[in-house]
Image: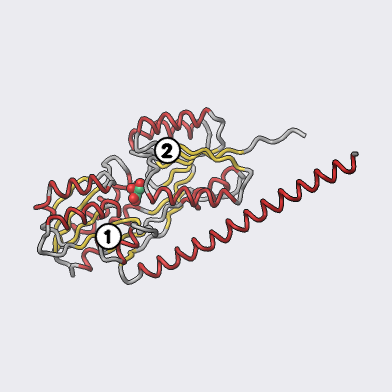
Amino acid sequence: VSQKKKRVIAFSQCIGNDAWRQTMLEEMKRELSFNPDIEFLYRDAHGNNALQIDQIRELAKADIDLLIVSPNEAEPLTPIVDSIYQLHIPVIVTDRKTSSGQYNAYVGADNLAIGKLAGQYSQTVLQGKGKVGLVTGLSGTSASIEREKGFKQSILAASGMQISGIIHGGWEKNTAYAETRKHISQMAQSDVIFTFNDQMAMGVKKALDEAQLKKDIKIIGVDALPGPGNGLEQIMQGHMYASMLYPTGGTEAIRIALAIINNQPYKRENILATSVIDKTNAELLALQSHKIQQQQIDIDKRQEFITEQNRIYQNQKSVLNVLVVS
Ligand code: FRU
């Protein structure tokens, strides 16, 4: 019997080394562990557009059945992702987007809605009156563009609210720290600072602490990731005021990928739910995610046990074979 080739799902990640994207990858691997007949190819572009273009081109040559891509910056990545789609290789875009809409499915939270939610929340916190500073992500990334647009829409519609300044943090803690230091007098006028992710919130917090301002500026971020040092913990420890939950969508991306390659129905737009996390609900969310983690450890143990039993069984079978033959 000729053996059917293993089906291959490729994933091109824009930047792999932060906790949020590591969580995304873990989710993908967990979901894939239930489907051992799938081969998974993973490439990390380290935040480099040119490298990501090359990596996608290489992956396409490897006879893949589907591409999942989180594009670094939208414009530079659009032509290569479009060309994969035009080769009739199914494409799932996740988190950040390209500029063309040429994909089979999109998975991610609605970043425009997240910006609006952060704007509304800031108004509530400031009782309709005050100044908000913004710290954006890398300028060509759809997530940053959409969060900024949504935030401005909700703030500009409120007469008592003003934007005290916009600085660019490039999604990174260190850049956000350096830029906040550079523009400290402008940022210090803010009552709230909305940083487009929690990593940058930590950089801003450090710069504000060092400046020893008299006032208490509330920092709001995005991601609300569980785990040591991440957003949830920062909220529980009072370093951040709130964060907009931004699910990674790793699990959903693999489920949709499997539906596509198995010719099952799937949706084109898969918008993940988001909500405000602050000190009123952070602990609950942390407990829940801890519980899920424990369950995962149980599943892993059982999986190991099954693999071991299988190995023993195969061994015994071959011993039996030898006995029967001799
Ligand atoms: C991680 C990250 C997240 C952010 C997302 C936006 O690399 O910066 O913190 O929510 O990317 O694409």
Dot 1 surroundings within 10 Å: few (below 14), some, or many (20 or more)? many
Ligand 1 has an atom within 8 Å of the beta carbon of the residue at disc 2: no
Q: Residue at x 59, y 57 (%)?
A: 301
Q: Position of residue 23 (x, y in %)?
A: 44, 52
Q: Is residue 312 left or right of residue 17?
A: right
Q: In which image quadrant can residue 305 be found? A: bottom right
Measured along the vertical axis of the image, is residue 139 above or below residue 207?
above
- Asked whether, in this view, residue 266 is left or right of residue 235, the answer is right
Q: Could you tell me which secondary element the residue under label 1 belongs to? A: helix
* Amino acid type shown at disc 1: Ala
From the image, which quarter does the C terminus lie in?
top right
Nearer mark to the viewer, of 1 and 2: 2
Q: Which element is circle 2 on?
A: strand
Quarter of the image for the N terminus: give it.
top right
Give percent across and percent down for residue 91: 49, 39
Callout count: 2
| Structural crowding at the residue carrying mark 2, measured as other residues with C-alpha within 10 Å and reported as few (<14), some (14–19) or many (≥20) | some
* Image: 294 above or below 31: below
Q: Residue at x 57, y 46 (%)?
A: 258
Report x, y in % for residue 176. Answer: 22, 48
Residue designated by label 2: 44
Q: Are marks 1 and 2 in contact (CB under 8 Å)?
A: no
Q: Position of residue 28 (x, y in %)?
A: 51, 49
Seen from the viewer's position, the closer of residues 235 and 246 is 235
Q: Amino acid at mark 2?
A: Asp
Per the image, the residue denoted by label 1 is 118
